Structures are given as structure tokens and as C-alpha cells.
Image (cartoon, grey):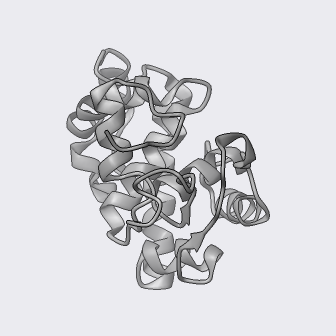
Amino acid sequence: METRCEWVPTNSLFARYHDEEWGVPQHEDRKLFELLILEGAQAGLNWLTILNKRDGYTKAFDGFDAEKIARYDDRKVEELLLNSGIVRNRLKIMATIRNAGAFLAVAEEFGSFDTYIWQFVGGQQKKNAWKAMNEVPSRTFESEAMSKDLIKRGFKFVGPTTCYAYMQATGMVNDHTMDCFRYRKV
């Protein structure tokens, strides 16, 4: 059996996420938007809760189509508040709608959201060399700069800790520990 990062429980959904997605550089705008929404939804919760609801989010939020989400009205918000497939938190739902509009504005300004977001790491993955998970920070200078700029552009639920988790999820940083079999692969 291959060694994984110590934060990965034996849950197969979590292991699959770790093995196939976490830390892999992501440059497709819709996927970047999906992960931004999911990381924001995770605030105050654990990631397994969100992974278990990921399919529900995909269905409820039109496959993370930012153009559709940006047009959601009060009726749609009320529908979402009744949807047990997502975290039914009005602030997080409203933030998703607001973030969709901000996401579209950034993508238009920079040509893509990918171009914008990857500037915070100079356009390429930052490969860290952690021996243990207790060495991994919960926020960095880059995540603080990202958070500050996203907030300035109207995004919600994008604090520095959420932004760092987003950077890890999208592969902007490789925070697999050095003993993890994924460390050299991403």
C-alpha cells in the first residue's frame, strides 16, 4: 500500500480525492470556479461533508455554470434553501451567486479566471517540501494577497485560510508531504 498524506482518512471518497485531484494543477475556468465555490461552502465545516455533497452542488448549481448562477433570483435562492444536497446556508448560497458575477467580471478583465488566479503564484505551482502535516501552514503571504484582492473584487467566503485551501486544491501549491506517493507525481 502506498503512503498518503496523514490527513487522508481511510474513507474511499477522501482517498480518491487526494489521489486524483488534490494538488493537481488546474487551469480550466469552470473547474477553478467549482473549487472556489466548494471551498467557500466548506468554511466552518469539514471537507468530507462537502465531498459527500459535491454531486448535489453540481446539480443544484447548474454544473457550476457561472453565467447561469449569476442570474439566479430570489425564487431560486428559496429553492436552494430547501435542497438537502447542499449546505443550506443563505449566506453561502448568496455568496455563490455573488461570486459567479465577480468570477465572470474577472475572467472578462483578464481573459480567463485562470490567468488571474495563477498570478498569485507567479503562474506556476509552488512545490513545498513538508515532512509532516504539522509543518503545512493554514495561510501564507500569497493566500493573504489573494484573499484581499478577491474581496476587493466583490467575492465572499474567501478569507486567507479558505484561499490557501483553494490553492492546495487547485494545485497552485503542492502540499503533499514528501513521503506521500503523490508528492513527486504532481
x, y (%) of residue 110? Answer: 49, 83
Seen at 41% across and 78% down, the residue is 112
> Which of these two is toward me, 99 or 126?
126
> Which of these two is toward me, 20 or 77?
20
Q: Which residue of the protein is positioned furthest toward the front in this rendering?
A: 1
Judged left or right of residue 163, residue 55 is left
For the N terminus, give its image quadrant: top left
Q: Is residue 76 visible?
A: no
Judged left or right of residue 77, residue 154 is right
x, y (%) of residue 118? Answer: 54, 75
Seen at 30% across and 59% down, the residue is 67
Q: Is residue 76 above or below residue 25?
A: above
Seen at 75% across and 66% down, the residue is 145
Q: Is residue 124 above or below residue 176?
A: below
Seen at 56% across and 29% down, the residue is 91
Residue 86 quadrant: top left
Judged left or right of residue 75, residue 172 is right
> Which of these two is toward me, 161 or 150?
161
x, y (%) of residue 109? Answer: 50, 82
For the C terminus, give its image quadrant: bottom left
> Which of these two is toward me, 50 or 104?
50
Q: Is residue 11 visible?
A: yes
